[in-house]
Amino acid sequence: MVNGDRVRKHTDDEVQAEIDAEAQRRVASLRGASREVLTRRLEELRREWDVERALEVNASTLILASSVVAGVRTRSWGFAAPAVVAGFLLQHGLQGWCPPLPVLRRLGFRTQREIDAERTAVRLLRGDLKAPTDVPPA
């Protein structure tokens, strides 16, 4: 199973439906838009952070900050936070889910596959593709 599929599988149905509906609304609002508007949206999609990146940055920031605090205070309990965060990353790597994931999904972070699906729809609207299957393999 692709990682984005694992994330979708572990996302609350209501949250998943809202993420999908929002993407459909954005694409529908672009129907008939100028090539410039479509190109601008494609650039926004290229820069959008997926849920994996958000999780990795969040976790590494917490690990780094906790390690610095523990190093400054030199107390053994200071390393508990990095250990917990590292455990979350391990759990996500093995299962495709971890405790921060539902929060990130509710904040609207999407999987790379979800972002790519919207990108394909915008490219179809712009005329770059004749069919969704015209997307060259990565």
Image (spheres, helix red, strand yellow):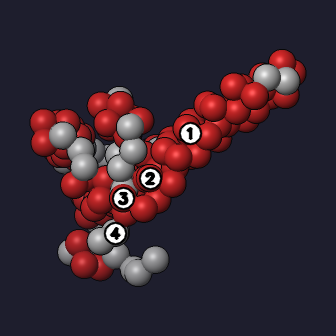
Is tag 3's residue or tag 1's residue first in the polypeptide sequence?
Answer: 1
Quadrant placement of the N terminus: bottom left
Within 10 Å of disc 1 (Cα), the crowding (few <14, some 14-19, many 20+) is many
Q: Residue at x 71, y 26 (%)?
A: 78
Q: Which residue is mark 3?
A: 95
Residue 65 shows in the view: no
**Sequence order check: which comes first, mark 3 or mark 4?**
4
Label 3, residues with CA under 10 Å away: few <14, some 14-19, many ≥20 = few
Q: Amino acid at mark 1?
A: Val
The disc placed on residue 91 is: 2
Mark 4 neighbour density, 10 Å: few (under 14) some (14–19) many (20 or more): few
- Tell me whether the residue at label 4 lies in contact with that at label 1, contact meaning CB atoms closer than 8 angstroms: no
Q: Choose top left, top right, bottom left or bottom right for residue 72.
A: top right
Q: Residue at x 36, y 56 (%)?
A: 96
Q: Is residue 31 left or right of residue 39?
A: left
- Quarter of image, res 83: top right
Disc 4 marks a residue whose amino acid type is Val
* Secondary structure of the residue carrying numbered label 1: helix
Q: Which residue is mark 1?
A: 85
Are discs 3 and 2 less than 8 Å apart at CB?
A: yes
Identify the residue shown where x is 51% and y is 54%: 90
Judged from this view, the residue extending furthest toward the top is 73
**Observer-nearest residue: 77 or 64?**
77
